[in-house]
Amino acid sequence: MSQQTLRLGVDTPRAAIVAIDLHRGHLDMEVATMPTSPEVAERVIAANAKLFAWARALGVPVVHLMTSYRDAQEIAANPFWRSRAEDPTATRKNVLRHNLEGGPGCVVMPQLWDESDFIVDTKKRYDCFIASDLDFMLRSHGINTLIITGVNTNSCVLATTTAANVRDYAVIVVDDCVDSMDGPALHEAGLLCIRTAFGSVLSSAEVMASDVLAAAGTRGAAA
């Protein structure tokens, strides 16, 4: 997408990275309860690391969203997830053990964490706005434009993009910084839904080359 066609629909963009579930529970093959493939994990970590470095340099906040449950009952309250836990062939068969508080999965991948980052660690469902203070955190910092990354494209990324859209945020999903444990077809299907109805889909190279987005951080705004 060229600079000329990047239309966000906001007069003065103020952006934040919203990084969804880039934690050991998905991306560290030694402890993950619902892992992506190793290849997907390596690719997503590398792409996000570059994007986050760009964002931090411009004063664009990086906000990590992390799934965490007090106990399995909080997970099993979702009927679909409970049914997946009973299917040994499902990608979500371990959902009742996924990211229980204090477990090794509830840690942002160290390659992606910086002390300047924010974390919202009360994510309970695919939609990152549900049962969390994400909306409060974003609005209190004057954010109107979300640059969304993370996993999984066809569940948490799609649901959060939809939720952000209906809350009147401008949304960009970074296609090489998202992926899915459900495979490439559902990754692409998620991106198709997003670009059709909910937000822009750009590559990380396009995001980092955008003068509009470079000016959307605190340092860019002050320049």
Image (cartoon, grey):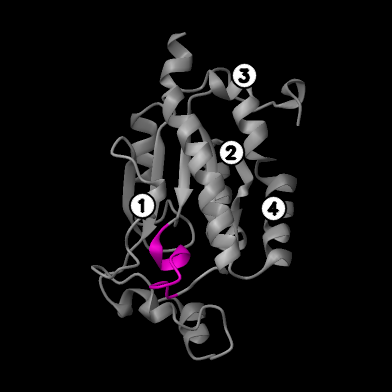
Is 34 on the left-hand or right-hand side of 102? Answer: right
Image coords of residue 187 (percent x, y):
67, 60
Q: SS class of the residue under badge 3? A: helix
Tell me if mark 1 has few (under 14), some (14-19) or many (20+) residues whose alpha carbon lies within 10 angstroms of its own: few
**Contact, mark 3 vs mark 1 (Cβ under 8 Å):** no
Tell me which segment is drawn in magenta: 23-33
On residue 208, which mark appears?
none
| The stretch drawn in magenta includes residue 27 | yes
Inter-mark Cα distance, 3 to 1: 29 Å
Q: Earlier in the sequence, mark 4 or mark 3?
A: 4
Image coords of residue 164 (percent x, y):
52, 44
Outermost residue to the top: 223
Q: Residue at x 43, y 66 (%)?
A: 28
Q: SS class of the residue under badge 4? A: helix
Task: Indicate the amino acid at tag 4.
Answer: Leu
Is 153 on the left-hand or right-hand side of 106? Answer: right
Q: Quadrant of the N terminus?
A: top right
Query: Where is mark 1, residue-wise?
Result: 110
**Contact, mark 3 vs mark 2 (Cβ under 8 Å):** no
Q: Quadrant of residue 158?
A: bottom right
Q: SS class of the residue under badge 1? A: helix
Inter-mark Cα distance, 1 to 2: 26 Å
Q: Earlier in the sequence, mark 4 or mark 2?
A: 2
Tell me if mark 4 has few (under 14), some (14-19) or many (20+) residues whose alpha carbon lies within 10 angstroms of its own: many
Query: Where is mark 4, residue-wise?
Result: 191
Task: Indicate the amino acid at tag 1.
Answer: Pro
Of circles 4 and 3, which is in front? Answer: 3
**Contact, mark 1 vs mark 2 (Cβ under 8 Å):** no
Query: Where is mark 2, residue-wise?
Result: 171
Q: Earlier in the sequence, mark 3 or mark 1?
A: 1
Tell me if mark 2 has few (under 14), some (14-19) or many (20+) residues whose alpha carbon lies within 10 angstroms of its own: many
